[in-house]
Amino acid sequence: MDKELQQDLQSRREANLYRSRKTLETAQGPEVVIDGKPYLAFCNNDYLGLANHPEVVARLKKATADYGVGGGASHLVVGHSRAHHQLEEELAEFTGRDRVLLFSNGYMANLGVISALLNKQDAVFQDRLNHASLLDAGLLSGARFQRYLHNDVDNLTTRLERSDARRKLIVTDGVFSMDGDVAPLPELAELAKQQNAWLMVDDAHGFGCLGKMGGGVAEYFDLSQDDLPVLVGTLGKAFGTAGAFVAGSEALIETLIQFSRTYIYTTSMPPAVAAATRTSLKLLREETWRRDHLQVLVQYFRQGCEQLGLQLMESASPIQPVMVGSASSALAMSNALAEQGILVTAIRPPTVPEGTSRLRITFSAAHSREHVDQLLSALERTVSPLQEEVA
Ligand SMILES: *Cc1c(COP(=O)(O)O)cnc(C)c1O
């Protein structure tokens, strides 16, 4: 067995697609220590700087004293605690939906939702740049699977018109995880109604960042439950904790409780994590300065890149990828930045399509302007000459 596996590993290495893990020795934040060396990091998804917020940490400790550590059982057996229930109610109020259901993580939420809603008689229509968990969920559901061109409403319309499936589910990222751009949701919501299709949005990267109160794309575009009936959020990004949720109608949530296998057959998230997330939800809503500061950093960075002649993608979110092209150049740039103490990950296929490897730079409210200055100088030394060569 090992001999055969080694061959596959070797070809992955030769294609510059080999992944290796870095061992983090500190909490998440702008300044981290990895394998004994200090770095200024621009690659986590802790957009609001809540993953190591003292109030969230204190709440987790206190809740651990009350609830212990493990969830102990699945939600339907005896793992559904008061803390889970309160978080669900607060998230329902926050999202303006009838009800919310917690999942252990976003990957499982997406698998659980799509396979509970669809079967072989149905069809799922996904943006071709959707997150892997959505694509996998579509395949698992057994529904006919179509990928439409990125953010291309006309292409999707044609596909919907041709379909005679029992149910049609349109699925998209809200803010695209590797590109940072936003789905054209008002148009998609309109189209879904016209075509008698259902709309599901995974807003893992929008919650906390978009909307005045951090309500993500639904708040940003003012889309009601009727416009956007299946809304998924994750808690491991801007919320700074762990887990995920689905927000929607009473009937949707009951359907998931009855039929969603990744909800039913798994241990509930640790109840103390749910309690800590209630604190992070409060901070996420109330401390609007975090979103404002993040926007200032993003604008400041984009201006700096323009002065350097660096090519950025169309993104107003804290995800600011620098497009590179080949996996080997992206990797070389990432390594060269690391030598200067700047941590930015190279994102390569199969996470992104062939030929679109990039540096995925992300910002957090915990970064300062000085941090951005340091990043810009390092990019100037490393990436601008290389990007010219590539272009
Ligand atoms: C991170 C992410 C997920 C997975 O969420 P986890 O809670 O980390 O499993 C799902 N969808 C999108 C768009 C993501 O970016």
Image (tube, helix red, strand yellow):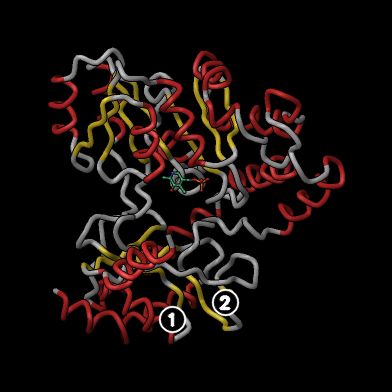
Q: Distance between the residues labelled 1 and 2?
A: 11 Å
Farthest residue, direction right: 65
The x and y percentages for residue 256 are 53, 21
**Residue 283 appears left or right of 227:** right
**Residue 276 appears left or right of 37:** right
Looking at the rendered structure, the kind of residue marked 1 is Ala
**Residue 220 appears left or right of 79:** left
- Tell me: residue 68, above or below residue 114: below
Q: Residue 34 carries which label?
A: 2
The x and y percentages for residue 59 are 77, 49
Tag 1 secondary structure: helix
The x and y percentages for residue 4 are 36, 62
Q: Nearer the viewer, residue 157 or 255?
A: 255
Q: Residue at x 74, y 38 (%)?
A: 71
- Tell me: residue 26, above or below residue 210: below
Q: Which of 225 and 13 is in front in this view?
A: 13
Tag 2 secondary structure: strand
Number of marks present in the image shown:
2
The verdict on label 1 being within 8 Å of ligand 1 is no
Q: Residue 123 carries which label?
A: none
Image quadrant holding the N terminus, namely bottom left
Read off the residue under disc 1: 338
Q: Which residue is drawn at 26% across and 30% down?
A: 145
Image quadrant holding the C terminus, namely bottom left
Q: Quick one: label 1, few (<14), some, or many (20+) residues within 10 Å?
A: some
**Which sits earlier in the primary sequence, circle 1 or circle 2?**
2
